[in-house]
């Protein structure tokens, strides 16, 4: 496993990290707590040291499962969680942090992130409280999620930001225009979520199969109409690249992402130990320049069908 420095922090994070949204169950189907725990422990054994969750994932259930999975190895892992956009006033931040600490069975959070910006709460207030908690030793590093460059610049006036967590994949590249250059210039590590476009880049879907009702992916704009068809065509092209390396389409997609500007880690979920192993197989090898060029072309063909001014994957 490759490890990379996270922003200006003292933390070295695994290039592939474990996404724990599914462990919250809400919005996902056929998720079992025991299986989630086994997948997380297998990921740790494979060298993954960063586990990302949030207070809103299943109303805190994901954090509880993470706390259970990492019990006994807490000092060997990095836990990232997030405070919701509805909890950004100073007193709400304190209460939310307390709840996360309890559910995660820990007395500190390695990376505490603002999940979404909230225009009704001044960033000065939110960041001010996060800095207070950081100085108290309850937070090691502060991060943001789903922020644009302007919002990061404002937040940075009140405290140091070590990471940004945006949606980023071969099929979702809005961040490349100005967000990634801003992060690179300001030493902010990027931890990308949905690097497999919620399974599209894992080659799981076909024209006959779509996410079932109740699955959050059924509201993802990439799974709609002509865009969905183009994604499937691109995945078929990617299979040839994967075969040339003895890898999977998912491995190719993650490997491509990890070579992008300012990337610290790609957050990938796993329901089983076998899936965790598959995620790790994305590291330790390189695509050729010709393959990278083809992938770039395929990704841009998909992006040409998506509203370039819409940075949100889901239709709520």
Image (tube, rainbow, N blue to C red):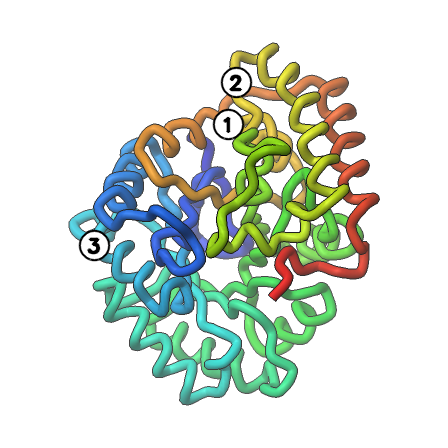
Query: Residue 145, relative to residue 275: is it above or below?
Result: below
Spatial CA span between label 3 and label 1: 27 Å
Spatial CA span between label 2 and label 1: 8 Å
Direction from residue 134 to residue 242 in the image, left or right: right
For label 3, the residue is 68
Q: Check disc 2 and report its element: helix, strand or loop.
A: loop
Numbered tag placed on residue 282 in the rendering: 1
Q: Nearer the viewer, residue 135 or 302?
A: 302
Query: Residue 153, relative to residue 111: is it above or below?
Result: below
The spot of residue 230 in percent (x, y) is 74, 35
Query: Residue 62, relative to residue 73: is it above or below?
Result: below
Q: Quadrant of residue 316?
A: bottom right
> In the image, what residue occupies the spot 32% across and 35% down?
272
Q: Nearer the viewer, mark 2 or mark 1?
A: 2
Earlier-in-chain disc, 2 versus 3: 3
Earlier-in-chain disc, 2 versus 1: 2
For label 2, the residue is 247
Numbered tag placed on residue 3 in the rendering: none
Callout 3 crowding tier (Cα within 10 Å): few <14, some 14–19, many ≥20: some
Q: Quadrant of residue 301?
A: top right
> In the image, what residue occupies the spot 36% across and 56% down?
25
Q: Check disc 1 and report its element: helix, strand or loop.
A: loop
- Is the Cβ of the residue at disc 2 closer than 8 Å to that at disc 1? yes
């Amino acid at each position: 496993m490759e490890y990379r420095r996270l922003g200006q922090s003292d933390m070295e994070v695994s290039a592939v990290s474990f996404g724990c949204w599914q462990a919250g169950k809400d919005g996902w189907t056929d998720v079992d707590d025991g299986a989630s725990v086994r997948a997380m422990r297998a990921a740790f054994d494979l060298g993954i040291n960063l586990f990302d969750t949030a207070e809103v994932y299943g109303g805190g259930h994901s954090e509880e499962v993470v706390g259970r999975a990492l019990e006994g190895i807490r000092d060997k892992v990095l836990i990232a969680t997030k405070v919701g956009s509805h909890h950004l006033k100073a007193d709400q931040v304190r209460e939310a942090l307390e709840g996360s600490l309890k559910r995660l069975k820990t007395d500190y959070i390695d990376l505490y992130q603002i999940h979404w910006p909230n225009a009704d709460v001044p960033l000065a207030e939110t960041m001010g409280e996060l800095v207070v908690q950081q100085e108290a030793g309850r937070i090691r590093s502060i991060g943001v999620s789903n922020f644009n460059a302007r919002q990061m610049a404002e937040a940075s006036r009140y405290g140091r930001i070590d990471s940004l967590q945006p949606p980023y994949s071969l099929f979702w590249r809005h961040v490349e225009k100005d967000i990634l250059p801003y992060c690179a210039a300001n030493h902010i590590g990027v931890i990308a979520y949905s690097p497999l476009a919620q399974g599209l880049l894992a080659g799981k879907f076909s024209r006959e199969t779509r996410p079932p009702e109740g699955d959050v992916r059924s509201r993802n704009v990439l799974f709609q109409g002509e865009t969905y068809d183009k994604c499937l065509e691109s995945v078929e092209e990617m299979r040839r690249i994967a075969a040339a390396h003895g890898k999977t389409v998912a491995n190719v997609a993650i490997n491509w992402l990890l070579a992008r500007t300012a990337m610290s880690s790609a957050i990938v979920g796993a329901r089983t130990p076998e899936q965790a192993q598959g995620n790790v197989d994305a590291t330790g090898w390189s695509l050729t320049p010709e393959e990278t060029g083809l992938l770039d072309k395929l990704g841009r063909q998909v992006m040409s069908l998506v509203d370039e001014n819409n940075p949100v994957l889901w239709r709520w």
